[in-house]
Each structure stands twice: as C-alpha cells, then as structure tokens.
Amino acid sequence: MNSKVLSIRSKSLLMVCILGLGWVFAGCAPAVLTPFPAEHPGEPREAEKTEATPEKPSPRALAALQLTDQGRMYLERGQPDEAIGILEQALNLNPASGMNYYYLSEAWLMKGNIAQAGEFNRLGEIYFKDDNEWLDRLMQQRERIKKRKPL
C-alpha cells in the first residue's frame, strides 16, 4: 500500500512541476507591441467606430434588424407575446427603426390592446415620414386599429 501512496505522490509532484515550468516559460514569451494609435486621444479607434454608413449599417442596427425579423415571424405564427419580447429588444438596440413600432403595434393589436397598438402606430409614423410604402402600411394599420373595440 505504501508503494501506491508513493506512486500517487510522485505523479502529483510531477504534475505540479510540469505546470510550474509551463507557467515559467509562458512568462518568458516576448511581449507583443501594439502600434500607437494615429487618432487623437479620446477618439475611438477605426475598429471601434460603429457609425452606420449608407452602404453598411451599424452592428446594433444589424442586430435590431435580425430581432425585428424574428418578431415578425412570431407574429406570422400568431404568437404576439413572444413577438413583443423580441421586438422590444430590437427597439432597445435601434429606437429609430419604424419597422419595430409597426410590428409592435401589430402585436398589441393581436392581443386586443388598442391603446398600445395606437401608440406604437403613432410612433412608427415619426420614423417613416419619407417612406411612402411604409406610411401607407401604417395608415392601413391605423384604420384597423380604429375599427377594433377595446377588450
């Protein structure tokens, strides 16, 4: 039995030595120097800039678009509660997206909450001033909201 204990201790000691050497050699690795940024202090570096351009939306806007599409799919499946959760996340990422307001209005209309549906419809109009196609959709939605009676 002593030989088993000695064998286990030897293996443990060997592992500690190997890990210790690994730690020592890792500390000997050459430092990687990063170039000094050419931008002024306080300005975001080129890789950190997230401004949208007409050709490329910001990462937040892209994530919001994906969430909006998921929310739309929940609406198509008749799941307004799930749609509302997803669309609110999209709205937090990109509050200037009229589509989020339109689909949130649809979700609340499905649930029978006419006041909420009307409010999101009104907010959607703010962001679609220059988009006649979406304005038309909003006006059609508004007519459906007016025809519904609150539950």
Image: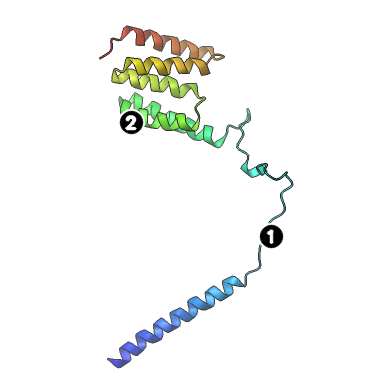
> Looking at the picture, does residue 30 appear above or below residue 15?
above
For label 1, the SS is loop
The quarter of the rendered structure image containing the C terminus is top left
Q: Tag 2: Cα neighbours inside 10 Å, few (<14), some, or many (≥20)? A: some
> Looking at the picture, does residue 38 appear above or below residue 105?
below
User: Which amino acid, by three-letter code, is at mark 2?
Assistant: Glu
In the image, farthest residue toward the front: 42
Which residue occupies 48% across, 76% down? 19
In the image, farthest residue toward the right: 38
* Label 2, label 1: how far apart the Cα atoms are: 48 Å
Residue 57 in the image, given as x and y percentages of width and height: 58, 32
Splitting the image into 4 quarters, where does residue 51 fall? Answer: top right
Which residue occupies 33% across, 31% down? 82
Which residue in the protein does label 2 denote?
A: 82
Which residue occupies 35% across, 11% down? 145
Residue 7 in the image, given as x and y percentages of width and height: 36, 87
> Looking at the picture, does residue 85 appear above or below residue 20?
above
Out of 20 and 68, give the one closest to the viewer: 20
User: Which amino acid, by three-letter code, is at mark 1?
Assistant: Leu
The quarter of the rendered structure image containing the N terminus is bottom left
Which residue in the protein does label 1 denote?
A: 33
